[in-house]
Image (cartoon, rainbow, N blue to C red):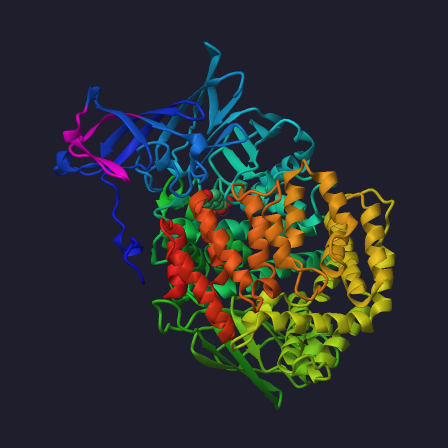
Amino acid sequence: MRDAQAPITFFRKDYKAPNHRISRTDLTFTLNPSRTKVASRLQFQSWSESNPDNLPLELDGEDLELEQVLLNGEKLDATHYTQTATGLTIHKPGREGVLEITVYIQPDQNTRLEGLYVSNGNFFTQCEAQGFRRITYFPDRPDVLSQFMVTLIAHEATHPVSLSNGNLVEEKKLGEGLHMTRWEDPFLKPAYLFALVAGQFVCQEETVQKGNGQPALLQVWVEPGNLDKTDFAMQSLKKSIDWDRTRFNLDLDLDRFMIVATADFNMGAMENKGLNIFNTKFVFANPELATDVDFENVESVVGHEYFHNWTGNRVTCRDWFQLSLKEGLTVFRDQEFSADMMAEGLDVAQADSARAVKRIEDVKVLRAAQFPEDAGPMAHPIRPDSYQEINNFYTVTVYEKGAEVIRMQHTLLGETLFQRGMQIYFDRHDGQAVTCEDFVGAMETALQEEHPELDLKQFRHWYSQAGTPEVLASWKQANGELELTLKQNCRPTPGQASKPAFHIPVKLGFVDVATGRDMPLALKGDSSALHGDVLDFTQASQSFVFTGLDKPVVPSLLRGFSAPVVLQSAHNTDDLIFLAGHDNDPFNRWDACQKIYGKAILDIYLQRGQTDGANTQAAVQIVGNLLKDTQLSDGFLALALQLPGEGTLLESFDGLVDPVAMHFARTTLRDLLACTYAADFKGIYEARHTPGQPYEYNAVAASQRALKNVALAYLVAAGGDDELNVAKAQYAAANNMTDRMAALSNLVHNGPANPPELAEFFERFSKEALAVDKWFMLQATVPASNESVDTLGMVSELLKHPSFTLKNPNRARSLLAAFAMQNPSVFHSHSGEGYALWADLVIELNTINPQVAARMARGLDRWTKLVPALQESARKQLERIFNTEKLSPDVREVIGKALD
Ligand code: 0A1
Ligand code: ZN
């Protein structure tokens, strides 16, 4: 680290169990926006039998105004405790007792949105990871589980609805316009799962039957005027409950399960026990306002939070280093849920394709966001060894790579043994706060019940080692045998210079060139490394000889993306064209297309725009083949026709890159494909554009719209005014947000500046915050290739727009994240102005909301991969941020690591 303000680093190895448990927590809130009183009553007991009186009771607390402390009814004077800026220590609390504390807090001053805050006059909480300490003094750590009883007192006129975790046990008027509700949560929970909500709300509710026949009340609460946006979230919740019961044998354990939506939220949503709080973005969905992708996200986030009830709440984390224990597992569960929902009601072949579409979407996210993280200054294992600010570790690594690590265990064990492992996990740990090791231990027990000779010993490296392994694959086929050689290497990451080999499950097949069929898999000699179609690849370099392969085959490796690695295979262009057309694994068909497109774009980049290379021709051929293939589903074809994203391309190039030139190289290939196949794209578009048809969200209809809109993008790319007019007509006729946004983005990104539709859109939706976010986002992502727009100038102007504010995280992201993270050709503009604007905004946001600022501050994580001139400007701005006064620990950690 580079500076005087020495940051505190927390280490996993320093974990110490708490001195006390808090068996019961009674909280009374007297809610007032500017000064809320929080009275707590904690029943505590020492864990230790020996010398108990000397063990201090340690409570966390930040920005609290302490009024009084009572121990067993007696007021404590300040000699009996130590109060610091981060907590309160009671020196000699005794072996057990009752501690009563009264504090005051200021929710309406809370722009960080951690702890208790006010949004649009209503109260909300966000306690994960360490927000509870901003509400009252408490052991704010996930291994202290307590039974909570919560009393909420509020003005009935302004805050008629008041909710907390668990069951409503009492409700009454108190006089002077006050009313009270009392909530009891029957389950033990750590403080990070506490929640309260109070204000003006309306709800949609339904009663469903639990597995045991008992009823449960489901509610979705929103601010008045938004009830027409809650149907889909309610439907998603019911589907989640059914799915968890059927696929994981896990039932709803509460009599009441509530979702509440707020416009001001730092993240996506939060799994507070029985009272999930959501960003409106992941609740609100109706055809007019939400795109198909928004619908898909609502279903998946509602599922994610619900699934946390078991994987996160019933079994929680011992400490925050174990975050992936709940997050990786819950993301895996929500991915499977979405895949099953997409495949619902389809025949076997269609269902396979639908599941593959979901898998491709998930891998795209991993490659675009997690691979760069794993290669950059913030790289960390899914179970980190240290952090400065835990909020910075809610990362794509902990979440998405964490899910891949669970998925690999699923691949190694198979569905039946994996579910057996889940059962062992809950049998052993229900009601506890545990570690990642406990999860793998349960899976290993399940595995060994069937296969005593196997273990997950080497597999555990996935938890402790950062970085994306690179796998090199080559092969020789002769005399009926194929020798496959695999080599693995993982580049150094911060603090980890070299790493032992990973246990990589390689799902594979050999595709007969003549018939396109998979050949049977048989290993010569010792076959213990092959389990069905999954090969255990465990050494730095390993060769496997397969027999029974008399006819020429093309290996299809890492099917379904069976491990989160970068595969460099010896496939030549013809092999890739063959796999793109014939691989029996749809994921690998898509991936073969991506590989060719990637190679073609890199060639164009390196040859400064030349398009006569063999890879470019192969890309043209592949698209031609795809367009002719009548067997492909719309969802698959939409994905297969799309070129790799710019972030993925930058990462795949092994040298210093110029993102602006890369953007133009990608645009060149896109335009070439668009011109070559203009008639086909027109055909696809016209066959699927049915303006009068009522909108319905379902997987099949959504994939038709997706393909139609991919075709529209190609049409506009190749065309002139006529094609822009197609987009204009689509905008004018749109009866849903998917078609409206697709049309508008073509107009804004490829057409002249300020099309009238942009103003129309704002007018139409000016009262709908999520649509206004889309309006900002569209403008912030106009690429450099649109020469009629000065995007940087426009973003600077938009910052002054009356609807813009950095205080609302969604709005801040709609401009700042869109511009700095989704628009590389403008952000990395050679003038350096993009970086300067970004730095200004990160600095401003740092004082308002450090957590969101720190996310935006990741915009230049990969600055050392840029060409020297850009590195120079990037460093200047990183240093400017780093030297800002009063930099939050959140931003300091991110920028400090980038500069290290
Ligand atoms: N546990 C939530 C994510 C979450 C994390 C932190 C938050 O505030 C700092 C809010 C939400 C999830 O995985 O959905
Ligand atoms: Zn989660």
| In-image side of 198 versus 749 (left or right) | left
Towards the viewer: 327 or 849: 849
Quarter that holds the C terminus: bottom left
**Which residue of the protein is positioned furthest toward the bottom in this rendering?**
479
Is 502 rendered above or below residue 442? below
Specify the quadrant of the image occupied by residue 448: bottom left
Residue 692 on image: x %, y %: 87, 45
- In this rendering, the count of numbered labels is 0
Specify the quadrant of the image occupied by residue 50: top left
Residue 636 on image: x %, y %: 72, 61
**Which residue of the protein is positioned furthest toward the top in this rendering?**
175
Is 133 rendered above or below residue 835? above
Q: Residue at x 39, y 72 (%)?
A: 492
| Residue 78 part of the magenta segment | yes
Residue 548 on image: x %, y %: 62, 82
Is 659 rendered above or below residue 273? below
**Residue 249 shows in this picture:** no
Quarter that holds the N terminus: bottom left
Q: Residue at x 70, y 56 (%)?
A: 351
Towards the viewer: 512 or 757: 757
The magenta region covers 76-102
Residue 38 on image: x %, y %: 36, 25
| Residue 898 part of the magenta segment | no
Towards the viewer: 231 or 834: 834
| In-image side of 798 versus 248 (left or right) | right
